[in-house]
Every structure is written in C-alpha cells, then in structure tokens.
Amino acid sequence: MNFKFPVIIIDEDFRSENTSGFGVRALAEALENEGMEVLGLTSFGDLTQFAQQQSRASAFILSIDDEEFGDGSVEEMEAALKSIRAFISAIRFRNNEIPIYLYGETRTSKHIPNDVLREMHGFIHMFEDTPEFVARHIIREARSYMDSLPPPFFRALVNYAQDGSYSWHCPGHSGGVAFLKSPVGQMFHQFFGENMLRADVCNAVDEIGQLLDHTGPVAASELNAARIFNSDHSYFVTNGTSTSNKIIWHATVAPGDIVVVDRNCHKSVLHAIIMTGAIPVFLMPTRNNLGIIGPIPLEEFHPENIQKKIDQNPIANFCLGPKENSGKDPKILTITQSTYDGILYNVEIIKDVLNGHIDTLHFDEAWVPHAAFHDFYKNMHAIGENRPRANDTIIFSTQSIHKLLAGISQASQILVQDSKTKRFDHNIFNEAYLMHSSTSPQYSIIASLDVAAAMMEPPGGKALVEESIIEALDFRRAMRKVDKELGDGNWWFKVWGPNDIGPDSEGMTHREQWLLNPEDDWHGFGSVHENFTMLDPIKATIVTPGLNLSGEFNEEGIPASIVTRYLSEHGVIVEKTGLYSFFIMFTIGITKGRWNTLLAALQQFKDDYDKNQPMWRVLPEFCSNFPNYERVGLKDLCSQLHDVHNRNDVAKLTTEMYLSNMEPVLRPADAFASLARGKTERVPIDDLEGRVTTSLLTPYPPGIPLLIPGERFNNVIVRYLRFAREFNSSFPGFEADIHGLVVERDESGCKNYFVDCISDKR
Ligand SMILES: *Cc1c(COP(=O)(O)O)cnc(C)c1O
C-alpha cells in the first residue's frame, strides 16, 4: 500500500531566489522525481503544533543555513541550535524513530554539538554529492522507517486486502462486490470505502492468522500488545469488555462458587454472576450527595470483612450449608477500576491485603487502558512496568480500548499477570474464550487493537497520555478563569476535583494533588484511606448549581438534564448526565477545539438562562418533539424541575437507595431461570415492596444496577420508583430512564410501570 507520508523540509530559504533556495529546491525535486511527496516549510512555527507533523511525515530535513541563523557568529549559532534542539526534543518526546537530517551548505557537521548530532540520521552537505544521490539515501531511510511502523496483524491484513485474490469464502459480499449490485448497496460502498470491505475477510484465510486459536499474525499481535502493556499474556476480544469480563468469569468461576463484586459494577459482571451460577457478596462503594460514586473503603477489602459478608449471606448458607460455607475462600474479586466518575485504586495495596485469600483479582479497567503509559498513574492500574507479582493471586485486567485509546467500537483486551506460585493455563482459559467469541470475528476490530497498542509504544504512548491530561487541566483552568471573571454573586459551573491543580498557567500537574485524602473537603466521601485512591484528571464531572455536597438544595437550581439537552442541540454530546452534574472525558482523541466549543456553549447557556429565553428559541429541536415547553422560559423550566427535586429530597433519596440494604433471596442464576420457565409475574410499582425481582433494575443516571435478580424490593427503592413515575408524567422529555421497568399503556393511554418478579403463585 502506498501510504502518503511526505518528507518535510524546513528551510527559511525554501522559496527564496538565492543559492541556498536553489540548493534545497534541487533536493526537493530529486525526492519528488523518486516518487516521494515533499512539504516545504519556511519556519518552525508553533513548536508543539509542528511536532504533531511527526505523525504524518516520513522524514524531516532541517536547514541550518537560514538567514535568521545569521552570519556565523557564535551568538547566532547558539540561537540556531536552540531552536533546533527545541524542535528535536519536541519530536523525540513523541517519536524516537523518524529520520531527522540536518542540511547545510555553508555549515558542516563540525559546527554541530554532539547532543544534537546524536538525534540525527545524517548531515547533508549538498556540495559533496548530487541531489539525486542524497535523495535516494533519504528515501531509503524514510521507507525503512515507514516499513517499521505497521504491527504484525495490521501489516498482514493490508497485504491481504491489496493482493486482489478472488475469494469463494464468506463474507458473502466478496470484498464489497455484492454492494455494487444495488443502488443502496452502492451508497454503502461509497460511504465506507473499498478498503473497509476488502479487509472484511473471514477466518478461512489462514495467512493472517486465527483469532480463536491465537495463531499467525494475530498471535504475534497479541504478543506485541502484551509486551507494550507489560503483561504476561494478552487476548484481543472483538465483542467489547462486556465479553472480556464474561470470559474471565467463565474461566475461573463454577456454579455455587462464592465471588466478591464491586456493587458499582458494569452489568456484564452481573450477567457473569447469572451465567456462572455464582453466589455474590458485594463490596459497597461510598457515594456523595452529588450522586458521584466514590471508592470502596479499604476496610471493605479486608479478608475478615469479606468473610463476615459471606457468613451472613443467606444464599451462601442455604446453598452450601453454614459449615461448608464458613472458611471457604471466594474465587474471584471484580472491581471497577476507575469508577464511572474517575476514581482509581492503588492496586498494590489491594494485592497486599488480599494476597492468598482470593485466587483471582479482576480489575475491570474499561476506562483506564491509558494509565499504564504514564508515571502519573503509578500503581493506580492493574498491570504495568515493574509491577511485582502477587504470591498466589493471578491478576486480570479487562480494557475497553475503544473507550480511551484508538480502538474502534467493541475493541477490548484481556491482560494477565501470572502469580509467583500459580501459572496461568492458556489452554483452559481459551475454552472460556471460545465460549464467548463469535466464530466470525470482525478483522477491522483486531487491526485496531493491534494499531492502538503500537501507538502506545514508548515514547508515543506517554506523550499521548500527557497531552490529554494537559488538555483536561487546561479545560479545568479555563473554567476557573471564567468563574473568577464573573465574580462573586454570579453563578458558574464548577468542575469537581481538588482545589489545587498545580501551576496556574499551563503544563502538567502533580500526582499528589489528585490523591484523595481524609482532610480534603472537595470529594465528599468522608474519611478515605490516605493514598489509597485518586481522581483521574481526564475524567471531568461538571457540577451545575443547585445542590451542595451535603445533599441540600439551594433556592434556585439548574438540573443537569436541561443543560445537557441544551448542549446536545449545540453539538456537544456528553458521556453521562446526573442530577446536578454531567460527565465528560479527555481521551487521546481530544482537541482544543472540542473543549473550547463546550466552554462556549456553557457560556451561551448561562446567557440564555439569565435572560430566561423561551424554550422554542434555545431548544427548537426539543420543542418540536415536546411542544408543551415552547413558551416556557429556560430559567423557569429549571426552577420547575428543581422544585420537584427539592420537594422530594431526591439527592438524599437516591443516595439512601443505593446504600440501602439489598436482601438476597435467591441465587441470581435461579432467579433469572424463572424467566425461561415462565414463572414470573408482572408486578405494578405500588405492590413491589417485599417482592423478588427477576430482572436487573438499573436507573440512568447513574447507570449502576440497583437490584439484581433474586433480590427483594425494599421501601426506599419503591419510594424512588414512585417518585420517578410522578416525575416522568410531569416532565415528558426529561424522563428518568430505568432499565428493567416494563412500561405498558392502559386503554386510556396512561403509562403504567411494572417489574417482572418471581411469581407468588408457584
Ligand atoms: C463500558 C464498560 C464495560 C463494557 O465494555 P464494552 O467494551 O462496552 O463492552 C465493562 N465495564 C465497565 C466498567 C464499563 O464501563
């Protein structure tokens, strides 16, 4: 494949009519005659922006003869070297391999100090060789650099897609040809492009390896990712971390096993509990009154505490008998590493506390595949460079590469770290892997996993992560600046996080500032254990006015759901919306443009709110679906919603509900089985108290499951459901979304809400 990566020449005289200009243009022409693209630039410009060019260039040629570098005096030379040094270090921060040449006519390499020369692939002195000769040399280096870039699977896939062989195997579209036979198919083909379809191959093609058997280039890529992420083993998964989690569970948990699970976990983990027939005990995270999920306190992890939970678990006692049950070690512990609000745990502390008590520690790192690449996150992720093995416990990490790194949707990976005494068995593990994998994996997803890993190869990975942290900090600083400029008595949005975030101007922050400590007043999680947890600065919760950390409502308030609706009509889509907060992320795909647009839209919101603009003007699209709001003012609508929240004390209600006692009555697998057996009953909200659910009940926000199959409805949860019902009927368009609720309309068109429960009539 002919990838387009120009040679970039930086020479002030590139367009000048002097000898220096002629010389460098002769070289450019010779490069072009050999089929190389050339981009001629006349200055370094903005250094960081410029250094980004390393991602699309095949080589750099820097002239040291420029006019601005003067007449050859010592000072002029020093100045010249200073800009060259700055440029080189900006490039090398991101890229160790790209060829960089110095080019001189009047100056020679003896003018250049060693520290600069060392970073060079050569010094071009144009009078010594012909431009053609020099061009061929540069092209050879540039090509060999380019050739070193593609990791194994991507390389094999590109080659395969290019070589134009006819296929008789599936997929049936035969490299896209099927689409060309119909008009709408043509549109599809034009939209996605030929390569995507040519590269959509099936596993009958042996030369690019088999994902399910881990052979050939696929295996080489998984090995490459293991090396880059510093794990002992790695598995690419093309069905998301939802599947990665289930694979680990099916490989390690059998029916009736006791398992320990973060109550704040992804639903795939709850699905795994159901599928494996495990008996779960839960670790309870803290939660502040803004609705932000905090860390699980360190005490919760202590083996004595876990044992107590097991001893008190009615299902465990019922299924295993209290005697059998007591002293039985749990099989796996799964925690959400990085909660949905960005809290990270110190994994070394958890390993120390639990070593020898649990066979498998599983960190669901869907949100932190970036952490392994920067010291900022030292020990705050499961597996990485120089991380000691646990004695008896195998460590797993599951990562959604598509969430934070450059994977396409569903790109996920499993990383494994062996323990000192227990060896991880690939063959056994792969049986579970096969159970959850399609026999027709999507090869673009595998290629994106391969490329995403290669992108993080040092030093590029660190640079990418550091850049996204700095963007996140710049956003936080910009938000504070607006706040300050508006002055006292003027409301503004706050970004949740430590008060001190490091230098005010720009640049990196200190890791210590992001650690949660007991004396901090910003997090609202009470007495956390020192240095045990930290907030990831790239995860930003933006708090809207109206509710304070103690759960008390102010007179006036701006519910977040209105702000995020407003933002979405202004082209800004947020990750998740809470009651008085919403959440955004600074991934490695962040740009200044993106967060500046958000900042501008927030300012616009404030403006429209203060003027109480009518809804039809500020949210026209929303109003076309819900015309009832057309004439309501933005501020008035906020007040109406806020008053309802306030009257029902919703912040405390939802906190209380998540911390309320969830009584397990049946093993989740048994409760779920009643669905298939038709042993369920659709129970209206008002009759739910005391009933046992067969579905997962998950309110959005926050998207954390509230009840799992086999648990009993308590009074607080029913109160919340009643509130949600009232709220939904009063404010269509702003409905609280609760997965697991069945909505049915009666004859009069009224919505009625039910939950499927274990039937009372057995
Ligand atoms: C998103 C998510 C998953 C599932 O990942 P997918 O790649 O979307 O399947 C698992 N765990 C957590 C904590 C998540 O946030």
Image: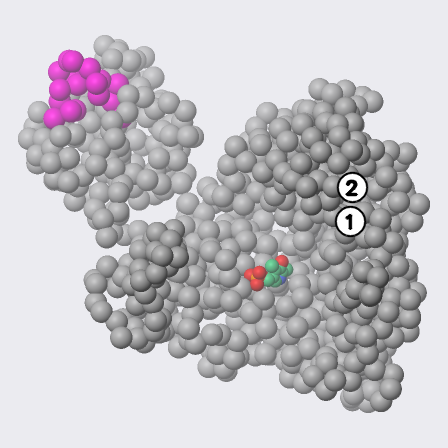
Residue 324 placement (x, y as % from top left): 78, 89
> Could you tell me which residue is drawn at 68 percent across and 36 percent down?
619
Q: Secondary structure at mark 1?
A: loop
> Could you tell me which residue is drawn at 68 percent across and 77 percent down?
274
What range of the chain is rendered magenta?
A: 10-26
Please say if 298 is above or below 32.
below
Do the residues under discs 1 and 2 have CB atoms within 8 angstroms?
Answer: yes
Queried whether the magenta region covers residue 96, the answer comes back as no
The number of numbered badges drawn on the structure is 2
Q: Which mark is residue 628?
A: 2
Pick the quarter of the image with the C terminus. bottom right
Please say if 746 is above or below 316.
above
* Crowd class of label 2 (few under 14; some 14 to 19; many from 20; radius 10 Å): few
> Could you tell me which residue is drawn at 17 percent across and 18 percent down?
21
> Could you tell me which residue is drawn at 79 percent across and 64 percent down?
745
Residue receiving disc 1? 732
* Crowd class of label 1 (few under 14; some 14 to 19; many from 20; radius 10 Å): few
Compare residues 217 and 377 and report the one nearer the observer. Answer: 217
Disc 1 to disc 2, how far (Cα)? 9 Å
Compare residues 717 and 570 and report the one nearer the observer. Answer: 570
Residue 22 placement (x, y as % from top left): 13, 20
Q: Secondary structure at mark 2?
A: helix
Please state the quadrant of the image where ligand 1 appears.
bottom right
Compare residues 698 and 225 and report the one nearer the observer. Answer: 698
Identify the image quadrant of residue 41: top left
Please say if 283 is above or below 547.
below
Q: Is mark 2 within 8 Å of ligand 1?
A: no
Q: Is mark 1 within 8 Å of ligand 1?
A: no
Q: Which mark is residue 32?
A: none
Identity of the amino acid at label 2?
Asn
